[in-house]
Amino acid sequence: MRALVITEHGPPEMLKVLEQPDPQPGTGQVRIAVKAAGINFADLMARVGLYQDAPKPPCVVGYEVAGEIESVGDGVEGFSVGDRVMAPTKFGGYAELAVTPAADLVALPDGWSFEQGAAVPVVYATAYAAIVRYGALHAGERVLVHAAAGGVGIAATQIARKVGGEIFGTASASKHDAIRGFGVDHAIDYRTQDFAKEVRRITGEETPLDLVVDGIGGASFKKGYKLLRPGGRIVMLGASAVMEGERRNIPRALRTVVTMPRFNPLTMMSSSRAAIGVNMLRIWQDKGSMMGEYGKPLTELMADGTIQPVVAESFPLERGADAHRYLAERRNVGKVVLTV
């Protein structure tokens, strides 16, 4: 099969389409003929060598795919060859074929493109975990969603709107009309405005937020935590701030780590605030299935129209370097996907 391989750590040009062995489905697994694969920021960090969970180069990354079932392993029930599906993948998604447990499959809704399907599994499971499962957002509560124009940001906004939250979202000014259309009530330009000062200005309160969803990291964690009222939660999804440019920048990464808060249990108890880290790969590894917990609620949200995947741009597999650069430059409103 053809696959987009990280040949070594470095700039986007390290991504090459190469022939790789076909993966074989085991018991309880299916093999998908991939039509589209989602790109996540973790993939970019893996490429430059800043993602510790990624396999070492040469390797094939990619966390989520959509396509048609090409073959099934022993013990698979409820799915057949030819079914249109989407699924998370523990790496290996940037390829013509990908293997995943049948328990993680979700049927692709009628009328959806494969590109839309590839924009759902990991992104919306992560957003659901942040907003509902761990963030425990309730109607009328205030939530701040960072990077509200990205894949997870849009997903979190749609789910928070369904819950009935008042939504603050950060994005560059050119994307404000878009994020308001997705459900953001208060758009904040992170490039020209201090988001903490702006949230306080809008609300007139020193600690106005019930929930912060943050995949930026660094000082952003500390500022968001200080915005929480008693009972507030910050859900930390990642640390995209450690990466700048197209190569690994260790000084930049170290500066970002140094600015992260050190949470003290005594002060957390006295202020009644919570800090929650979410790593979907770890949850997946522990439970043996990711969509086992999130498949049913996400399917219901797709059926009622809450989930509306937004594809910013799609690139053929051969233009994987362009796709990574497009995402790294934050040009996207929505998900960036590869087509196979």
Image (cartoon, rainbow, N blue to C red):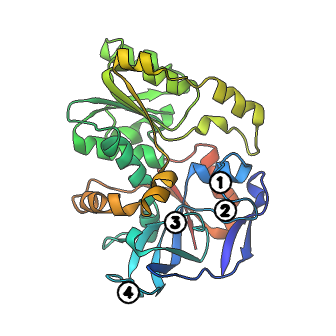
Residue 276: quarter of image: top left
Q: Residues within 10 Å of mark 2 (few under 14, many from 20)?
A: many
Q: Residue at x 65, y 54 (%)?
A: 324
Mark 3 or mark 2: which comes first in sequence?
3
**Dot 2 lies on which element?**
helix
The tag earlier along the polypeptide, 3 or 4, is 4
The residue pinned by badge 2 equals: 320
Q: Position of residue 197 (x, y in %)?
A: 44, 15
Q: Nearer the viewer, residue 205 or 75?
A: 75
Q: Disc 4 marks which residue?
A: 80
Residue matched to label 3: 89
Quadrant where the C terminus lies? bottom right
- Check disc 3 and report its element: helix, strand or loop: loop
For the residues labelled 3 and 2, say whether their Cβ atoms are less than 8 Å apart.
Answer: no
Disc 1 secondary structure class: helix
Q: Is residue 329 left or right of residue 26?
A: right
User: At 37% across and 13% down in the image, what residue appears?
Assistant: 201
Camera-near label (1 vs 4) is 4
Mark 4 element type: loop
Instruction: Give the residue number, with chain letter if any, for mark 1.
Output: 324
